Image: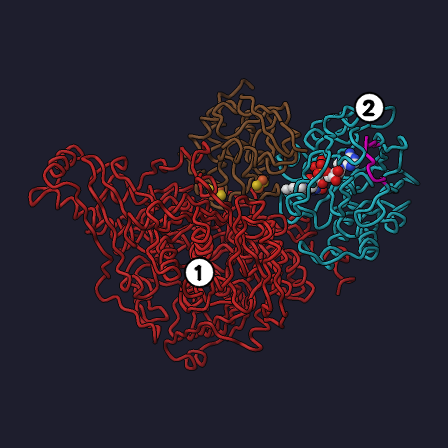
Amino acid sequence: MRGNQGTLRRHETMAHIDHGRMVGTSPARTDGAQKVRGLCRYVDDLEFDGLWHGATVRSPHACARIVAIDAAAALADPDVVVLTARDLPGPNVLRLIADDWPVLADGRVNHFAEPVALVAAPTRERARAAVGRVEVRYEVERGIHDLDQALASPRILASCRIERGDLEAGFAAATHVVEGVYDTAHQEHVYIEPQGMVARPTAQGELEVIGSLQCPYYVQKALALLFDEPVRVRQAPTGGGFGGKEEFPDAIAAHAALLARRVGRPVKIVYDRHEDMQATPKRHPSRVRHRTGVDAAGKLCAMEIEVILDGGAYTTLSGVVLSRAVLHAGGAYACPNVRIEGRALATNTVPSGAFRGFGAPQTQFAVERQMDRIARLIGTDPLTLRERNAYRLGDVTPTGQVLEESVSALECLAAAQARTDFKRRWHEIEDARASGEGHALHGIGLALSWHGAGFTGEGEQRMRSPVRLALVAPDCVEVRVAACDFGQGTTIVLSQIVADALGLPTEMVRVVDPDTSKVPDSGPTVASRTVMVVGGILERAGRRLVRELGQGGAPPASPAEFVELARAYLTQHGELEVEERFEPAPGQTFDETTYTGTAYSAYGWGVHVAEVRVDADTLATRVERATLVFDVGKAIHPVLCAGQVEGGSLQAFGFGHLEDLRLSEGRPLQDSLSTYVIPTAVDAPDFDTILIENPTRSGPQGAKGVGELPMDGGGPALVAAIENATGIVATRAPATPEVLLEDLLAGRTLGPEAVAGALQAGEPLEGLR
Amino acid sequence: MGAPDAVAVAGCTDLMVVDTATGRRHGAVVDLQRLPELAGVRDDGGWIDIGAAVSFSQLRREALVAEHAPILVQAAATIGGWQIQNRATIGGNIANASPVGDSLPVLLALGAELVLASSSGERRVSYADFHRGYRETVLEPGGLIVRVRVPHALPDQFQGFKKVGTREAQAISKVVVALSARRVEVGGQEHLADVRLGAGAVAAMPIRLRRTEALLEGAPVGADTATRAAREARAEVNPIDDARSTARYRAHVLGRVVRRLVGDISA
Amino acid sequence: MSEGWTLSVNGEERTFVGDGMTRLLDVLRESLGLVGTKEGCGEGECGSCSVLLDGDVVCSCLVPVFQVEGRDVRTIEDATAVPGLAALQDTMVTEGGVQCGACTPGIVLTAAVLLERSERPDRAAIREALAGNLCRCTGYERIFRAVEKLVDQRPRGAL
Ligand SMILES: Cc1cc2nc3c(=O)[nH]c(=O)nc-3n(C[C@H](O)[C@H](O)[C@H](O)COP(=O)(O)OP(=O)(O)OC[C@H]3O[C@@H](n4cnc5c(N)ncnc54)[C@H](O)[C@@H]3O)c2cc1C
Ligand code: FES
Ligand code: FES
């Protein structure tokens, strides 16, 4: 085993897996040289002739009736154009799951910063000035601003339920029953490039949009409905997404396109940071209730889990986020008797949306905290309890899925133990905590997580995503997919997979820029599906291309032979394009009405070990070191893979203790990078990343998705480390110093005798109680 | 110094943020960083004399400041990241008069004085008398802070500084405290004298914790004094809830930090 | 304050006519077409607009152009902005310090200044130097390693 992006290899190999030459190496990403030199052109960097600027009139209220919109003052600038819901050419809806998300508010607003009108002008300044001159009169109504209020009068956006075994019998057999309630807050994506889009009528009169986005075909479908015409959508290089550019680009693209159609010229809308933070989706806040039965040894007998998500004002993606939340809510643990019920409730807040992990970080925060509670109850350390309960090959998940391959929970735990000596250190700190002195409190904590790769259930089967490969020159094969690179390195990673399938170096494979006029709808770039699902179909396409090139004869045995055959083929027949579609593995079915069957064809497994230092005076936590052990199936590009794992983990640590977004009457109190704080270079730990390769049959060369998994365990590992350091039992993420103080004052601790000595020293709390 | 209604700007790290947010425009503008009167750090008979337009990066490099006002160097190192420190000036921090300005409690603790200039001439004011209320100061409209003067450190002087920010770096303070005190031996025991305790983010303006200072004045160095000072400090402030923290947290942490700083004197 | 302002950008004298309070960032991006400098927040928080002003790294979103009159501005487009810049750029790519790239121009410039001014910065020094440059993608680890790799390649002076 090598650390620091070393890989732990499984010696077993699977018969169908080729061992190519590009996969497993770390060639320079294709856009790297441009990015480091400032030559990469993002949407706000592009030039267009006659470009105008768009801006958005937004609601200052979270819940109100629109009485009147008066644009006269804005229209005093003769160039200014103002559009409202009345001016839409088609239905006022951005279609996702339910048709309840309007393009522009009509008659009422349901969340703060909801778009009410659009403005275009020749310059950004004039557009912004005009926004201030559109007068909207509202009649403010009482809104529902948080989960407590929503639970009092629930409006359900989505619900689902999983049931397995006999819950009552499970509890009856249990020695202990443990209950817990866990909360998580909104989290903001903070992609460094804010949302932006340009729309323009082309010379042929078509509508084209170019922007910062993850899913070109989502945008195309949204616009097709609105305009009733084909629209071309192109992804510009995108400065971070993390799910934040999954569904929201539909809205900003619709806005830009409406303005562009009206003024007959290119219109650009780029949000500033405040607007982006106020108006775009965030991670669903959650409340998860656990009731768990365990036997004397800590083996799980029964799990009853209730998951509540705050969906915000419109359904958008809440149904699928809830589904993933619920499917991961039991954690990476086998339990014969399980009931998980989930509901997403409406509130008057900005719609909650896709964010790396898609509900799973919230429910795994809860289950991991619950496991820590159980470990203490039965008197063992957190790692040992997890070893006892973690999924093994052949175990059955709550949906009845038998885990038949690529289960690495125990292996990840073992590697984490070997690397960090977790058990000994955890116990040492536990024993010394109460009598300890000094204001630096050290703690260690851990979380085990799992994450299903690809769409849930039969989502991939329904989509049957096509991908295409085309031989365009003797030494160049083009990859035509809608997968977007917004930093992860999709481009180079897919070209490595294809290169190996073709027996070529990556230089001979070119991934074309996502453009709906050039690439098929290979699905959105979400759900940890790109490498495993899209990459898998591409691998098959590559094999087919080679076969077809061989024209019945022997396939090319070297790049030189490939070029030779390709040249012959091209002169004879012209471009060779092959298309392949998703093919489900036999026997994988999922019933969405009963939530039974194969929820995901493969799961990634991971352990976060967080070592923290908590300041006894300020209760501020610094993660000093993080050991990340992740089974990714196959690290196609080890450097980028480790980068995903580390970057995702730092977001998770931010979620765990730093990133607090609170609302007042539906309005975010933190709407700038000064008040909403994400980790800086000084906040980031030293990362020790270990990649385990336990291949899956479902992915190219065994690879599983890795995009979201690192988001799942970071938060609970960090909060567990705080508990180890201080004796404070936090049940909320983020566990900010303010939250920890309230926990301490309210006695939410391991007990008065178990709290860190330094927290009790002096006479710290009396005056506040 | 330019047109009478001119806006004086230094590092623009406060000004430009407001301009961008509000879209406000200015008439004439004067660049204070080009005025020699506001530049440089020099030794001036028992005082170090710092130009108001000196940036925090520059302060961090000045040996004189490090020698006599180490807590000012410490504070400077916590103000934003490199980009901010390279531009932000000490005069701007003072003039901006934010309750969370990090150099301000330090200047209170060090007993600094300011040289102010206006159409009616130059005058010196004790920095302790400079702030009047929330972003309100004794500076007249159009007036300038020209120099910031800090007395030389005494051999028996202790200085302590602690910033409690929203994160480890590039953070605005939730609470910030600076302490200066002399250690005087009386009857074989060290006692505190000339105590000045400045605090930020716990009131509408940076303040001296006068009651806590009074408690500390003449008190023996030690853990007991530290604990009593913590209680007094917490009782003497009335902080608020805002986007960065809560009143309860601020009061609690103020006490803890005061205890730590006073405790550090004996360390 | 609409006047002409003359500044040196990447070694060339350039003139901007307009309000002296215009952000240097806008002058670079909109008037001079130097769009390698990015805007991530417009308030000095993210560092993606970092440029060098007389050799020091500053946020161009907080610098009014009138203050730059007669001064030297270097942007990411200038391959010679800081000695050693090119080596750092290449290492950032090979070590995985680049993901989405939105923070990258700012990070590269700041780290290059660190490497120029400090012979053997340790990790604490690298962290401090980069505190004003937010990166949301990488977790910073690979950025640190890129800088450390260049430090390791430096000949060790006699002790
Ligand atoms: C990202 C970021 C991080 C920050 N972090 C911190 C921090 O950690 N701690 C902290 O304390 N502050 C912080 N600040 C605030 C700011 O940097 C400081 O307040 C700084 O010292 C202001 O100085 P300046 O020279 O930039 O002032 P400017 O913005 O130039 O001026 C501010 C105001 O003061 C007036 N003024 C300036 N100089 C004088 C003078 N000599 N006489 C009279 N009036 C004057 C100006 O007219 C203006 O109204 C931060 C700001 C940003 C953008
Ligand atoms: S854009 Fe200037 S610091 Fe963010
Ligand atoms: S690489 Fe995306 S923000 Fe740093």
- Disc 2: host chain: B
Is the N terminus of chain B in the top left, top right, bottom left or bottom right quadrant?
top right
Residue for point 72% across, 28% down = B33
User: What residue is shown with label 2?
Assistant: B43
* Residue C78 within the segment the image draws in magenta: no
User: What residue is shown with label 1?
Assistant: A358
Residue for point 20% across, 49% down = A541
- Disc 1: host chain: A
Q: Is mark 1 within 8 Å of ligand 3?
A: no
Q: Position of residue B178 (x, y in %)?
A: 78, 43
> Is C141 or A213 nearer to us in this picture?
A213
Which tint was used for chain C?
brown
Q: Which residue is at the far right?
A: B187
The amino acid type, in three-letter code, at marker 2 is: Asp
Q: Using the rendered image of the protein, determine whether residue B174 is visible from the camera's viewpoint.
A: yes
> Is C77 or B93 nearer to us in this picture?
C77
Residue for point 73% across, 55% down = B250
Q: Position of residue A410 (x, y in %)?
A: 38, 57
Q: CA distance from mark 2 to mark 1?
A: 60 Å
Which tint was used for chain A?
red
Is the C terminus of chain B in the top left, top right, bottom left or bottom right quadrant?
top right
Magenta residues, start to end? B139-150
Numbered-mark total: 2
Q: Position of residue A337 (x, y in %)?
A: 39, 75
Whether residue A747 is situated above or below residue A23 in the rendered picture: below
Chain letter, colour cyan in render: B
